[in-house]
Image (cartoon, rainbow, N blue to C red):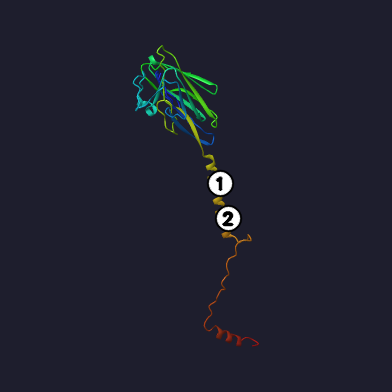
Amino acid sequence: MVQGYNVLPMMPLTSFTLFSILSLGNARATLINLTIDDTNSSHWTFIGPDWNAVTPEAPCTKCALTPNPALVYNTTWHDGTLLSGIFTFEGSAVYIYGIDPPTKWATNISFEMNSITSSHFRDGGSQYIYDSLFFSVSNLDSNGPHILKQQLDEQHPSNSLPVQSLRVPNTTERPLGVAAIIGVTTAIGGLVVLFIFLMALIFLCLRRTWVLEFFEPDGHRARPGPIEPYRIQLHPNAEKLWSTSSAHRPGG
């Protein structure tokens, strides 16, 4: 069986390809998927001396399984017989995908993590089956480290087992080949609250400015400015006419 991990892993019989996808986060976080390839020794440990790391630069000429490298994530995988491996990660979910090999190399692979056990066996017929889901678990504690153990179980007298490659994809990227997924969180709720607070503060400042422009400091309505006295245009002879009029008043 060919297996590799792509948030899900995939594996061939004598070879094993994996990569992992991790998801971290909470209700106010955005999940960010990471892809961890099987060549990343910080997360992947292959136990046993007979594992063969297959890459474009170091092909395995003695391996029975030959999956299409173009369909395997990062074109890398591990090939071995009756061997085991450990994948360590931090995240809220993990999905393992693999590559199921043709029938004559069909192999069983077992997984164990946090008292959860599962096994995968699939007859691929005459073809390799890529992106086959081998193992998944969600609702994990995103703050604590997790250890996922895998074991290739003997199914045929040849004792040859799957190939694995692991990876953790980024955001919307869909992994090819085999992988496990680890999610990473980015809090955005706080930014939304901060934006609303700043907008409210700006509005209150503008409102206070408008009020101060319209009212005096004592709170009363601002009084209009001084009124210019009304000027009457008198007739040029008004003074003479007034004197004449006064001279003819009774008792004058």
Asked whether 240 or 106 is in front, the reply is 106
> Quarter of the image holding residue 78?
top left
Mark 2 — residue?
208
Three-letter code, disc 1: Phe
Q: Is residue 197 above or below residue 85?
A: below
Q: From the viewer's perspective, is 214 left or right of 107?
A: right
Q: In the drawing, what numbered circle is on residue 197?
A: 1
| Residue ID at (56%, 50%) | 201
User: Horizontal and vertical percent for residue 113?
Assistant: 52, 23
What is the quadrant of the N terminus in the image? top left
Q: In the drawing, what numbered circle is on residue 17?
A: none
The CA span between labels 1 and 2 is: 17 Å
User: Horizontal and vertical percent for residue 38?
Assistant: 43, 27
Q: From the viewer's perspective, is 91 left or right of 53?
A: right
Q: Is residue 21 above or below residue 201?
A: above
Labelled pair 1, 2 in contact (Cβ < 8 Å): no
| Crowding at mark 1 (Cα within 10 Å: few <14, some 14-19, many 20+) | few
What is the quadrant of the C terminus in the image? bottom right
Assign a secondary structure to mark 1: helix
- Please identify, in this view, whether the residue under mark 1 or under mark 2 is nearer the observer: 1
